[in-house]
Image (tube, rainbow, N blue to C red):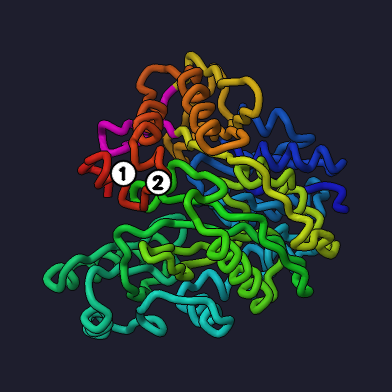
Amino acid sequence: MFEKVLIANRGEIALRIARAARELGVRTVAVHSSEDTGSAVVRCADESVHIGPPAASRSYLYIPALIEAARRTGADAVHPGYGFLSEDADFAEVCRAEGLAFIGPPADVIRRLGDKTAARTAMAAAGLPLLPGSPGPLDSATEARAVADTIGYPVIIKAAAGGGGRGMTVVHDPPGFAAAHRDTVARARALFGDPTVFVERYLPTARHVEVQILADGAGGAVYVGDRDCSVQRRHQKLIEEAPAPRLPAGLRARMGEAAVRGARAVGYEGAGTFEFLVDEAGDFFFMEVNCRIQVEHPVTEMLSGIDLVQEQFHLAAGRPLTLRQEDVELRGAAVECRINAEDPDRDFAPAPGPLTEFVPPGGPFVRVDTHAFEGYQVPASYDSLLAKAVVWAPTRDEALRRMDRALAEFRITGPGVHTTLGFLRRVMDEPAFRGGEYSTSIVSQVLGVKTVR
């Protein structure tokens, strides 16, 4: 096992990694920008290094500063968390060139799966079902329009290098295609430095179901259940639950087996997530692979009893996967709600500010992953996630009641600070959600929130 790991991230995931490392006897190095000097992970880690100003491009995304911090502190491994550089193949490559273990998949796997067109090709070869779409990247708006006209509307235009729910535009009819294509290409260039896009059929009432996998790169691979992530706004997840409700056992197994097959086909190593769309007929289609730990990994941990972050450490250290598929036992139901510092009444605009009150819920089978505390200054420079409330219960109905109670107990106040707590309770109170019969359209169609795209 590693002796010291540098945590190349911030917020709740950095604290989560630090705790997992401490339980393994691994020392930790927290990095921080000048805006995060007093953060929870800085106080929790064994060492901390200031890496730059608040702008992420000059701190958490600045590879030379991260590598220098690792050198200075004698770290022998780097955990990237999620977001920032977690799926940056160049960062993984530089780490390994500098003699640092990168706690994630090899750079060539990240590069291959990070390009969504290359990932589609690889998964098609592995026998995973795909939605109709362009066989590869599209060179022009004319070519893209021809694909859309062939497969039929609605379609979705996606950035090949996209991730995190960004760089996607839904087009419902031919007249809107040219402007949507132009905007998506521009956004892809600005966000990812790559204007490449592709087109595939859009399923307006599909369910977004993902499968958690663990793999050792030598053929050992298992799936650790599935999660429903259909409650979204702007393709960003708000509520996740496991197991996905109303999913036939046969379909559940086929999706898990497909994810393992796909992981083996590319030599995947570590924890990863295969994302699928499930249509009304019960057919599933490959969407993408996330080469990192997910924000919503706690719901899977609550069901399985497996510490996924510690598994990442073991696999990155070169240990073979000791789990067999028959060893994975899932019990009960778990739900996660993301509490963001956003104002739902203003199109979910960020609402930063100082926290004068921060009281998380408690009680049996309630887990809160957070980096916030009373007196914490919610920054305007980074993602607005404040906390993740996660509950477990023997049944889904009991889990939903427990979550509603937990959200009602939360106390988060401060001048200028708004949160999504009330909005999350509204979603969970909807009959479609209660009945487990919702899709990715629940926020905009069932709740009638016209500002949510």
Q: Amino acid at mark 2?
A: Val
Q: How many numbered marks have been drawn onto this rendered protein structure?
A: 2
Q: Is residue 357 magenta?
A: no
Residue 26 rendering spot, x and y as whole percentages: 84, 44
Q: Amino acid at mark 1?
A: Val
Residue holding disc 1: 443
Q: Is residue 85 visible?
A: yes
* Residue 184 relative to residue 177: left or right: right
Q: Residue at x 61, y 20 (%)?
A: 362
Q: Secondary structure at mark 1?
A: helix
* Residue 26 relative to residue 19: left or right: right
Q: Which mark is on residue 231?
A: 2
Q: Residue at x 38, y 17 (%)?
A: 415
Identify which residue, 355 or 348, lies in the foreground.
348
Which of the marked residues, 1 or 2, is nearer the chain's N terminus?
2
User: Does the residue at mark 1 contact the one at mark 2 (Cβ under 8 Å)?
Assistant: yes
Magenta-tinted stretch: 340-353
